[in-house]
Image: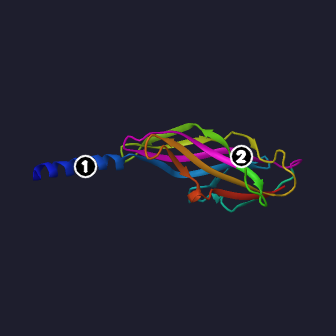
Amino acid sequence: MFGMKKLSFILLFVLSSLSWGQSAGFNNTFAVLSLNNGANTYYDLNASTANQDFNNATLGNFNPAFNTLVLNGAEHNVWKCGGCDLTSTRLYYRIYLTSNIGGAFSSINLPWASGFNNGCGGQDQVWSITNSNVNLLSGLSAGTYYLELYSDASITCSGGTAYASNGGANYKATFTV
């Protein structure tokens, strides 16, 4: 009887260890913007680098007749371990007056760019797009706006979706038209 309990405990421990080892998520995320026809600029979302932080940034004042504010995409640095797979990533965005409540999000799909083996039986990967060319000023009237962003990834374990969303508050920068 004692041997059976011991065997059951060992089996439970091994199976639990396997399920804990299956995981995936975000390391760093970046938004890619072009201001006034300039080069792509990377802004930190879920990252701490030398890039400017996107959250709470003031992107500037824009006159749609003379200026541009373009969302060209994002870069997602992700990890996957223990047989869990990460199959796609997206950047979600919406624009709304700071005096209003935001509406629906639009999304940009990020293609896989590269990957390499990591130490957990999986891969670290880069998913990236830098030429989406979303004109953020199109159709906007005068006012101060939020550009709100978050990212997600489809995964084959742990609930099916991983988020980089500032703890659910998302990432917001302002700009004025």
Q: Which mark is residue 103?
A: none
Give the foreground label among 2 and 1: 1
In reply to whether residue 49 is colored magenta, the answer given is no
Bin the neighbour count of mark 2 within 10 Å (Cα to Cα): few under 14, some 14-19, many 20 and up: many
Locate residue 139 relative to residue 147 in the image: left or right.
Answer: right
In the orientation shown, which residue stands out farthest toward the right? 65
Q: Nearer the viewer, residue 74 or 37?
A: 74
Residue 16's x, y, as percent?
30, 49
Label 2 sits on a secondary structure element that is: strand
The segment highlighted magenta reads: 64-93
What residue is shown with label 2? 71
Give coordinates of residue 164: x percent, y percent. Answer: 56, 52
| Residue type at tag 2 | Leu
Label located before the other in sequence (2 or 1): 1
* Magenta stretch: helix, strand or loop mostly: strand
Residue located beneath label 1 in the image? 12
Whether residue 60 is visible: no
Q: Residue at x 58, y 37 (%)?
A: 111
| Residue pictured at 51% horizontal, 45% vertical | 161
Marks 2 and 1, Cα distance to the nearest angstrom? 49 Å
Looking at numbered disc 1 in the image, what kind of residue is underneath it?
Leu
Q: Position of residue 52 (x, y in %)?
A: 65, 59
